[in-house]
Amino acid sequence: MPAFLDAESTVQPGCVLGGKYRVERVLGMGGMGVVVAARHVELNTGFALKLMRHDAAKDEESVERFLREARAAVRLKSEHCVRVLDVDRLEDGAPYMVMELLVGQDLAELVSASGARSPPEAVDYILQACEGIAEAHAAGLVHRDIKPQNLFVSRGTDGMPLVKVLDFGLAKSIKATPEIRSLTHTTAVLGSPVYMSPEQMRASRQMDARSDLWSLGVCLYELLTGRTPFEGATLPELCSSVLNEPPTPMPSDIPRGLMRVIVRCLQKDPRRRYADVAELAVALEEFASAPGAAARIRAVLDTPRTELEPVHAGLSADPDAETKTAASIDTTQRVQRRGLPLAERWPSLLAIGAGIAGLVALAFVTKGPAPSQPPPSPSPIAAAALPAAPSAPPEPPSSVPAPSPSKLAPARGAPARRASTSPTPPATTAPPKPSTPVLVPKTTEF
């Protein structure tokens, strides 16, 4: 079997890929590659392997997009996202992806086989998809190809339906590096047109996470009605309908509140849609079979995560650094809005009071009042040798008053605190007033 698959080639059961995966059957084929069920020859465990076609593997951009899908999916740990376990290359360098093997069917097959779903069932499927999409959005990724074929219904450990989001091959980093942006040209159209948002049709680069909300709304519409909200005989007609026409009215047996949720998801202007998947989940939970999904989705969306390409430049490798940085930013914003609480201001107030007390004590020690006894006069011989000093009026005392003790006292209720190791003025009576004017040192009043 060729490592790269040709358009006419199929993977034959019994082929061993990478020296350890024996192919059992083909699960599906597409324009980019093929997915097969395989069993590890040593572990005897089933996996799903995704391989690239020969023509796609010749294109560097396609190979890089294939590897991006693996890097994106491996970071997502939600039970509502398909798990990528390994990425490797075949003998000739062809990349392949090892994923968990799912048993079930996608939502497109479900609707095709048994028709439209009831509102509670349809809403439950979309809410589970929202949990997987929330983790991707929290990591800075937009899926860009949400459709019923990429929403797979398997069974959980409790036997209940479990929706998993597939195929992050078109996932886009919200804040990607120039290298990643170069993979998507400004005018490139990626995704399935029936489920693409208007902004994604116009330019793939001019979109954000709200584009996925549009696609979720289209999926919910199809689950409830068995058809899509926008139709056209040709691709240009379909695109014109998505860009310019309102969605086809829904049957009257669908709850009107649920209709309003879908209509809001399908607003042409992204600003008029829900802000995020958590807000969408709150609106949908009223029609779900059980509560609790909206709270889980909000918790997933608000949990700090590491994006495929770094979003927060400059953060350290410390796993708690992002949380610490977020807490620091929150504290700074809180101080800027209303200032620190009184309990948090006491250390600063005490430090200021201690500094003032230290300055005053230092001034009294180094430049205290003049002594009561005048210094001895120089000897007659020394006096005769000195030139006569010109007579000048004594300098008047400084007009800046000494700081009042009341202004230096700590605030009422402040605990006693040792301000400085400098000696404090003795608690004795003031020295006798000198007969000559005393110059009071200038002290800055705080």
Image: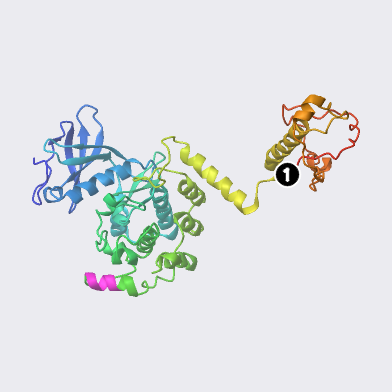
Q: Is residue 6 left or right of residue 369?
A: left
Q: Residue 243's spot in the image, x, y percent?
A: 32, 71
Amino acid on which the number 1 mark rests in the picture? Thr
Residue ID at (82%, 26%): 380
Residue ID at (49%, 52%): 294
- Element assignment for label 1: loop
Q: Residue 410's spot in the image, x, y percent?
A: 78, 39
Q: Residue 6's spot in the image, x, y percent?
A: 9, 49
Q: Which residue is mark 1?
A: 444
Q: What coloring was used for the rendering?
A: rainbow
Q: Residues within 10 Å of mark 1 (few under 14, many from 20)?
A: few
Residue 239 counted in the magenta span: yes
Residue 254 in sight: no
Of residues 385 and 40, the one nearer the viewer is 385
Give the main secondary structure of the magenta stretch.
helix
Residue 122 in sight: yes
Residue range corresponding to the magenta coloring: 235-240
